Image: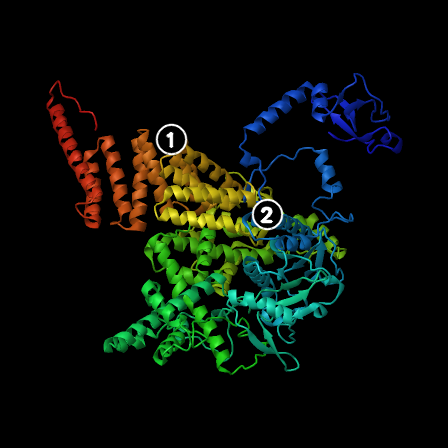
Amino acid sequence: MTYSGWNPPPGNRRMHGDLLYLYVVTLEDKRYHITGCTRGFYLNQSTEDEFNPKHAQPKYLSHSLVDLLNQISPAFKRSFSALLKKRSQKHPFERVPTPYQMYVWMAPLADHQVDYIRAEDAFSTRLGYEEHIPGQTRDWNEEIQTTRELPKTNLPERLIRERAIFKVHSDFVAAATRGAMAVIDGNVMAINPGEDAKMQMFIWNNIFFSLGFDVKDHYKDFGGDAAAHAAPSNDLQGVKAYFNMDPDHLYTLGTVVVDYRGYRVTAQSIIPGILEREQEQSVVYGSVDFGKTVVSNDKYRELLQKTAAALKIRPHKVLNSEGESVELYSSIECKGIIGNDQRHYILDLLRTFPPDANYLSVEGEELSEFMKIHGYPKKHRHKLPCLRQELIEAFIESRYLAFVKHAALQFQALQKQSKKTSEDKPALTNGHSCDENKNKLEEEDVSEEAKKLVENITGSGAGSLEDDTKEIVRKAAQASGSLSETEFSITFNPDVFQPHVRHMDPVGETYKKDKELSKMASQHIVASQIPLMINDFLDHTSSPVDGITLTESMHARGVNIRYLGKVAETLAKYPSLSYVYTIAISELICRSTKHLFCSFMQGVDMMNTAAAITHFLNCFLGSYPTPHASVTAEETKNNKRKSKRKNKHSAVLSIENTEWTSENPKALWKKIIDEADDYYGYTLECDSIDGALEQYGCQRVAMLRSICLKAGIQIQLREYALETKARPIFSEDDIVNVFPVVKHISPRATDAFHFFSSGQTKIQQGLLREGYELISEALNLLNNVYGAMHPEIAACLRLLARLNYIMGEFGEAMSYQQRAVLMSERVMGIDHPNTITEYAHLALYCFANSQVTSALRLMYRARYLAIVCHGEDHPEVALIDSNIGLILQAVEEYDFSLRYLEHALQLNIRYFGPESLKTAMTYHLVARTHSCRGDFRSALQSEKEAFSIYKSKLGETHERTKESSECLAHLTKQAVVVQKKMNEIYKGEVNSSLPPIQ
């Protein structure tokens, strides 16, 4: 079916109500011309050669096009009914669109079918493409800012506001992603077409696009293109921080960072009027040249005063080009622009958080001896390394605990007048010493009583404070690194260590404190946060499954990814964390490879994209020593001819060369090792993929998955001979697509989040029913704000399923968990760690509902996905194998059950220790399986191990120890009976037979 060649109707036929003409070829191979009019659809008498709009015989006038097609084609009627039936059988979650596009790294190669409607839509439909029709292009900036201005005084208003913000934001992300892809594919005209391709900027669909290159040497002193590539990510973190605070009358731009085909594109909404004048004239606050010239504005100072306090930014004075002092409440690069809509916008928030002194080599500045021992400061390729907001919060919390502890103990010492306590006082002032790692647990264990004491001290009026109490607070403030002597106050100057910024008093005490505080915060990563994260891994409170979850763990502790080498170095010291070490090394290799892939792809012509990606993957992952890129001589000639007449407005038609074809595995791995050393400060002891697999236990398929997700590569879903050394692994046909990797802020449903947090607190207190009601309410609010699909809704469904299971409602638990699985697959990905967890939970609830076959299939699926992510050598696999063993035991498949349980036992011994309770439980399960098989000797041996662990860990009176003791007695009795009967059989007694197994 397509539009007829006679479409659109001429003027005289419009007077008769004709709206359009369609041309249909039915499954019976009959051809019809259909008129769509104001009353419905009917067959007309037109042919391919003659226009005749009169009714055809027989006369059918149908209100619906489907009804008309049903009448003229019986095959369509049958097929359409079957199609509707199949669609109705699908779960609604399989049909509902997701708020953000989800891409998979592996997809089947679908047959390309003829579709005339699709062909016409590609060029005739304006939706999603460059729109020149007046009044039809969305004003993204106006929509984003108007939704922020909606009232928020009560719950209904907040729900409407948050729903509007989320809807506009998700639409903006989709439009920005499409636009960024169009820019890189060369389908958008640059606004400065005369400039070099790297310097071009674009406007499409009211969105401004810029490339991640150093335009006009703007970042020349900060690392050039490397700094220009890092700046959008830092800027996005700043936008996120201001967005989450939700300040009144202060506006940020809609911002999306897109990595596509090796290029980084920043998409931003456009400030009204910004394109009508030069940036220097627009900026009323901040600096356009990293501090050489600075301006300020009273209204901006008033607005930023509130945000500075929340973001721990210290108001500071700098000198402008005339030598006048200017007070700032943000970093100097933060620009304030008043738009034509009279709104106050802030942009360029890349230095919202303090600089990371560990990666800045500043002349005349030295780090502490502790940091020097750890090899800092390290050289970095750009001078824009910033600390994360999570780190700032953790650092201030640790300083506050030091302040509280110091003040409380000294106050107690003052009250008691104890000589011994006062002698211990010097040790307590070591709040910010290099020994943070050793004392971190002590700092966290400050009693509520101590906090109350300090509140009494600091809460009383200044007139009533005694001199010695003032002295205590002064010393505590000094010990904790506080900027004030009368209270605890830690704020950061984001402009320290900046070469072009002229501070008001660069040799003064305040500026020295600013620099020291920045160094202390940077030191906190190595001295406290990384060790705390390692402790989480050792305690199994956090257990990374792949690079994504490892990155989340690092970011949760405020540790930047550039510390990945340091994390790997630390993990190498713990044998029980060998699985995390393997994940860290894999992530380090894949991230280094992604850096190289970006520069590799920038020199590739679009015509050879698939060939180049194939060649790169073969060099990176293949054991075949000499893969050859398949570029024909004719293509090379075409490239040369094209480059002479290349279109200047295309962003990516860079110098088309064939240098990429000379890449080989040895040279690529040499670059990967150099990149890992240069960027992450880690020396890899391998020179090929085989060396990495052997040396670090990496998994080839896990690394393939990781690099595809990071670089935006989609490969064909099929069996690959990854281990082959006889030929390259991939061919050009295996590259299905390239997809964008998108970074953006995520608006939150605040009220739903509060309900969810309250529900979790109630559950922890054991109030399951109250917790269940709060979580259910949170689910309603989340659906109200986000719609049907969102990762937070999936988390809510998982918790509700778990609560139902605990409360004995197994049917409800399974229903909720099934929805959680479907949603997680859609919004997180089919092999995301969260999806694996959802599968395992659903298997448990199916088993509880006696659906044993389904439970087993789900567990096998979870195990398969886990192995794709990290291989079999992981504690999560031990849990899955234990569950599979139990299910197989229930269906009396004892031999298979034993195989899984013994593997789980090996992993539990390796990662939890031979004396852990998990190991004891697995021994017990193994003993039961041996017992069911009739192997009582092995069963006794395993149960003895379990009893020994329970006895040493829990004591003889514990329920589990008693249970194990009873099991031992039963097994011993069974073993004696069986042996006795066996002896009788050997003696040839006629009536002897083996007893039934109990």
Residue located beneath label 2 in the image:
160
Rendered position, 389 above or below 923:
below
Amino acid, disc 2? Ile
Observer-nearest of 217 and 323: 323
Q: What is the CA distance from the residue labelled 1 to the residue labelled 2?
A: 40 Å
Observer-nearest of 786 and 111: 786
Callout 1 environment at 10 Å: few (<14), some (14 to 19), or many (20+)? some
Using the rendered image of the protein, determine whether residue 873 is visible from the camera's viewpoint. Answer: no
- Residue 370: % across, % down: 38, 72
Task: Say which residue appears at 76% left-offset and 41% top-offset.
Answer: 124
Which label belongs to residue 849?
A: 1
Which label belongs to residue 420?
A: none
Q: Quadrant of residue 228?
A: bottom right
Using the rendered image of the protein, determine whether residue 223 is visible from the camera's viewpoint. Answer: yes
Task: Say which residue appears at 27% left-offset and 42% top-offset.
Answer: 921
Q: Earlier in the sequence, mark 1 or mark 2?
A: 2
